[in-house]
Amino acid sequence: MLILRRAQKELKKLPAPTRERIAEAIGRLAHNPDDPALDVKALNNDPEARYRLRVGSYRVKYCREDEIRILEIVRVGHRKDVCR
C-alpha cells in the first residue's frame, strides 16, 4: 500500500477519532479490496483516482492495481473538499 504525501498530510489534519476510523477502513481495504462491507464506488470522471471509499462524511480516493496488488491512496478528506 502506498499513501501519497498529500494524502498523508490531509490525514494528519483530521481529528484523532476520525483519523483512526479512516485508518481502520484503509487497513480493511488493503486486506480485502472487494469486501462488500466497505462503501466503495468506482469513479468515472476523476483523472486523479479510480475509486472512492466512504467513511462517514469523509472520503478516501485511491487507485488499485490488482495484478501487482498495489493500493495507492491519493486523497483523504471531508466530502465537501474531496468530491469536487
Image (tube, helix red, strand yellow):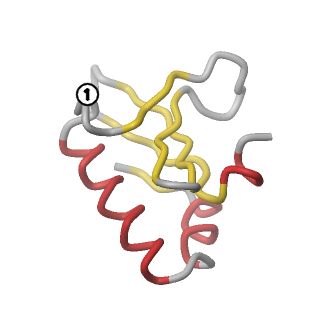
Left or right of 83 on screen, residue 52 = left
Q: Position of residue 7 (x, y in %)?
A: 59, 60
Q: In the image, what residue occupies the spot 49% across and 27% down?
A: 41
Q: Position of residue 45 (x, y in %)?
A: 72, 19
Q: In the image, what residue occupies the spot 70% across and 26% down?
A: 46
Quadrant of the snapshot with the C terminus: top right
Left or right of 58 on screen, residue 18 = left
Q: In the image, what residue occupies the spot 38% across and 40% down?
A: 71
Amino acid, disc 1: Asp
Q: Position of residue 79 (x, y in %)?
A: 67, 50
Instruction: Determine which residue is flagged by label 1.
Output: 34
- Asked where in the image residue 31 lies, by quadrant, the reply is top left
Task: Classify 69 as above or below 78.
Answer: above
Task: Classify 18 as above or below 51.
Answer: below
Task: Classify 66 as above or below 27.
Answer: above
Query: In the orientation shown, which residue stands out farthest toward the bottom?
Result: 16
Q: Position of residue 60 (x, y in %)?
A: 53, 48
Q: Secondary structure at mark 1?
A: loop
Left or right of 56 on screen, residue 67 = left
- Asked where in the image residue 4 lies, by quadrant, the reply is bottom right
The answer to which of 81 and 63 lies nearer the viewer is 81
Query: In the orientation shown, which residue stands out farthest toward the left?
Result: 31
Task: Classify 51 as above or below 84.
Answer: above
Local crowd size for mark 1, using a 10 Å CA cut-off: few (<14), some (14–19), many (≥20): few
Q: In the image, what residue occupies the spot 40% across and 36% down?
A: 39
